[in-house]
Amino acid sequence: MIINKMVIMRNFYILNILLIAIFGNFVCAYADNFKPVVVYQGSIDKNSYNLAIHDGVKSFFEKTGMNCTESVVGFKMDDYLRTVKKYADEGYSPIFIPYGNHFVHLVSFVRKYPATRFIVLGTVYDEPNIFSFIMAEHEGSFLAGALAAMASKSKIIGFISIQDIPFLRRFCCGYAQGAKHIDPDIKILKGFTGSYPGAWFDGNATATMANSMMDKGADVIYQVAGGAGPAVLKAAAKRGKLGIGVDINQNGLYPGSVLTSMVKRTDKAVFAALMLAKRGVWRDNYKRLGLEQDAVGIVFDENNKSLVSFEMRARIENIKKEIELGSILVHDYTEDMKCSACVKK
């Protein structure tokens, strides 16, 4: 997806209509207990992923005047579990869990609350009271990788994230596939800073890794690092290299130094989920949203206009169409935990 100011409003309405349609029209007893809460890990404002979720909550309030409780806890999973349990015991439903892939004992936990709805982002669980949203980050990341390969002069690009888990490997693998689609010989440096308290906000760690990659020749670096991600963009800009943002449009953080941002319409998904939950509309327990639904993509705007030629944009648009038509198949790492960084055509 190529996003600019002229298509944002169109995509807003299209995505919400699609989400309502795919949820179906089965009304159940859960509607009688609409008391929603989102439980975040770490700061909202300093984490692009959290901020996108918050924007969805804000849109819901502006539309309906109804509140959705937002709770921010620390980085220890024990604290997170205690907080989720507290809200479940108090009768909140649905409970949004943005980091379902971090919640090791989620299935056994939700089985203790069969009358409570849980909405999980980023992973799938086959439980009757869990609804999973999967955004096709690998498809959006494919476009980011393709553009990175077009822009790279050194033919060395980088990828930086935090935890080495399947969910984040989905971004990495999509990025690698896109880059290899443009240049089969391109070199891709990959790094994960690790799992420790505060890692998602440790800009020193991500900046150090970015500088190490640039020392090795990388001139474009894609960061999928939450609150620690902007430090990568800053490090790249400082050295005259290019960064790639994630989750929301981060092109404006360092104009002329951010090649693009791989955005996810997580805010619209959260908004639609809240609207449907309010009405008691539920169907099955898993939805996947990707390029075809305008739910992921890359951003072109005034801040990166000088970095992307007309020919590059046209080429990205053609690749997008090929993915939507199925002539380019983007492999999802989480399907088999493998990434060959090759594309079947």
Image (tube, helix red, strand yellow):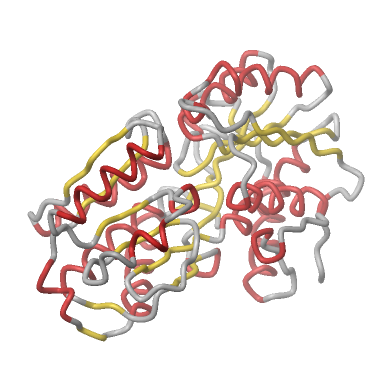
What's the residue at 48%, 68% (across, down)? 293
What's the residue at 74%, 74% (across, down)? 327
Is residue 223 shown above or below 228? below
Q: Pinpoint residue 147: horizontal percent, then vertical percent.
A: 70, 45
Q: How many marks?
A: 0
Q: Nearest the camera: 336 or 161?
A: 336
What's the residue at 83%, 22% (across, down)? 216
Q: Nearest the camera: 111 or 42?
A: 111
Horizontally, residue 7 falls left or right of residue 66, namely right
Is residue 9 shown above or below 195? below
Q: Which quarter of the rendered picture does the N terminus lie within?
A: bottom right
Q: Pinpoint residue 69: horizontal percent, then vertical percent.
A: 17, 47
Is residue 121 shown above or below 228? below
Q: Nearest the camera: 2 or 223?
A: 223
Q: Pinpoint residue 342: horizontal percent, then vertical percent.
A: 83, 59
Farthest right residue?
A: 185
Please tell me in which quadrant of the rendered image residue 208 appears: top right
Q: Which quarter of the rendered picture does the C terminus lie within?
A: bottom right
Horizontally, residue 219 falls left or right of residue 89, namely right
Farthest bottom residue?
A: 26
Q: Pinpoint residue 5: horizontal percent, then vertical percent.
A: 41, 48
Please tell me in which quadrant of the rendered image residue 80 appears: top left
